[in-house]
């Protein structure tokens, strides 16, 4: 290129686009090689993660990056993501084998509370993309309707939000888990990025009403409080609030929802990332009529609910069982027993696979300290050991 010639921005962007296409192509090739690697590991019964191999890879990549003037911290972040994704690919492969590659059919039917564009809908898309099947959604207003639709065979899976890093547990879903016949077969942690959405550009001080799901409003209450005392109206889910604003076609009415929902309904994003806290995640449970098998090489979580006897120290005795057997608890939530004042059920997650005999023995010990115990399911954990 002539050094005296002014760069053509289109030409430069075309070159960048070409490089980006090549990067994506190479990542696709790496993805396919990861599948070949896991087939070798499965045949030879090898562990999925090789920490020494990962360290050597990162060291080599950083050294190679120096030749091209690339920051080693940047490369470290990029390749840790690539490695973790490769591990996930291999876990997904083993899970398909453990469950005989069975999905219900070429089409997966998913029940959600809310409509297309809601966070349940988006979390479902993210979780089920690993199967490559066509996804169809059934929308319901209430969580109990979502559960019933799977219990009676109208759908294959239920997407149930169970907790949020900002607003905490979703009590209605916890209560449903106690009585449902469904099993937890997976989890999805979905990053929630709330946006202020409207029909057209408008100054914040001119907005008159905000439509929002009550939890979305709670997670963004500081932003709402600075909007000159606007009226607030609750909706069953975030996507419904966007649809309502579109139907009203009034620029002074806005909604709180995701960027995806705004794009889906052709709306304007007036402000992004309006939640009180960054790193705002909702954890969803994936439930089905039958439990699944989890390959013992895949990090696994087991969820259960139990009630202890009416005597001092009974809960401590129950929890000591996990410490005695060196099992890490990742969640403990209490809920009142309806109709029994001052009595509580305890929902607990721990790292372990119900198919392993040592875990079964632990739960038999736990039964000695409880008057009720129900295993809700063992499923692949998204809390994968981080790449270090």
Image (cartoon, rainbow, N blue to C red):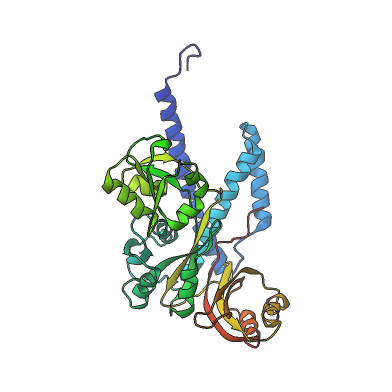
Question: Where does residue 183 sit, x and y in percent of width and height?
Answer: 46, 76
Question: Can residue 292 be seen in the rendering of this structure?
Answer: no
Question: Where does residue 201 sit, x and y in percent of width and height?
Answer: 36, 35
5 vs 239, nearest the viewer: 239
Question: Where does residue 385 sit, x and y in percent of width and height?
Answer: 63, 60
Question: Can residue 258 be seen in the rendering of this structure?
Answer: yes
Extreme-top residue of the structure: 4
Which residue is pictured at 37% across the width and 64% down the height?
A: 112
Q: Is residue 97 left or right of residue 297?
A: left
Q: Is residue 128 left or right of residue 264?
A: right
Q: Is residue 343 left or right of residue 216?
A: right
The image shows residue 134, relative to residue 77, as above or below, that is: below
Total labels drawn: 0
Which residue is pictured at 46% across the width and 37% down the height?
A: 20
Which residue is pictured at 57% across the width and 70% down the height?
A: 301
Extreme-front residue of the structure: 229
The image shows residue 347, relative to residue 368, as above or below, that is: above
Q: Is residue 62 left or right of residue 144?
A: right
Query: Which image quadrant for residue 384?
Result: bottom right
Query: Which image quadrant for residue 330?
Result: bottom right
23 vs 330, nearest the viewer: 330
Extreme-right residue of the structure: 324
Question: Where does residue 352 sit, x and y in percent of width and height?
Answer: 61, 73
């Amino acid at each position: 290129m002539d050094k005296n010639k002014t760069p053509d921005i289109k030409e430069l962007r075309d070159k960048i686009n070409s490089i980006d296409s090549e990067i994506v192509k190479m990542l696709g090739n790496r993805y396919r090689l990861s599948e070949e690697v896991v087939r070798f590991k499965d045949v030879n019964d090898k562990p999925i993660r090789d920490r020494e191999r990962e360290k050597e890879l990162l060291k080599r990549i950083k050294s190679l990056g120096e030749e091209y003037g690339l920051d080693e911290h940047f490369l470290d972040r990029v390749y840790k993501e690539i490695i973790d994704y490769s591990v996930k690919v291999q876990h997904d492969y083993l899970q398909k084998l453990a469950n005989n590659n069975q999905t219900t059919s070429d089409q997966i039917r998913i029940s959600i509370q809310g409509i297309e564009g809601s966070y349940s809908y988006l979390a479902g898309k993210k979780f089920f993309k690993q199967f490559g099947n066509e996804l169809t959604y059934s929308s319901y207003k209430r969580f109990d309707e979502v559960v019933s639709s799977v219990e009676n065979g109208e759908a294959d899976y239920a997407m149930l939000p169970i907790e949020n890093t900002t607003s905490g547990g979703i009590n209605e879903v916890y209560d449903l888990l106690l009585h449902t016949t469904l099993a937890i077969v997976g989890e999805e942690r979905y990053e929630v990025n709330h946006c202020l959405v409207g029909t057209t550009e408008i100054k914040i001080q001119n907005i008159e009403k905000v439509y929002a799901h009550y939890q979305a409003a709670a997670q963004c209450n500081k932003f709402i409080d600075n909007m000159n005392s606007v009226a607030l109206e609750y909706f069953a889910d975030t996507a419904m609030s966007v649809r309502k604003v579109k139907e009203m076609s009034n620029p002074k009415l806005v909604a709180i929802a995701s960027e995806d929902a705004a794009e889906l309904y052709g709306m304007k994003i007036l402000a992004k990332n309006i939640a009180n806290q960054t790193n705002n995640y909702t954890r969803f449970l994936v439930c089905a009529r039958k439990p699944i098998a989890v390959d013992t090489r895949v990090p696994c979580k087991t969820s259960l609910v139990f009630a202890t006897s009416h005597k001092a120290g009974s809960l401590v005795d129950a929890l000591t069982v996990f410490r005695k057997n060196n099992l890490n608890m990742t969640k403990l939530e209490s809920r009142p027993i309806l109709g029994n004042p001052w009595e509580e059920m305890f929902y607990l997650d721990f790292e372990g696979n119900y198919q392993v005999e040592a875990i079964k023995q632990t739960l038999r010990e736990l039964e000695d300290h409880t008057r009720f115990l129900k295993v809700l399911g063992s499923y692949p954990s998204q809390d994968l050991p981080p790449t270090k």
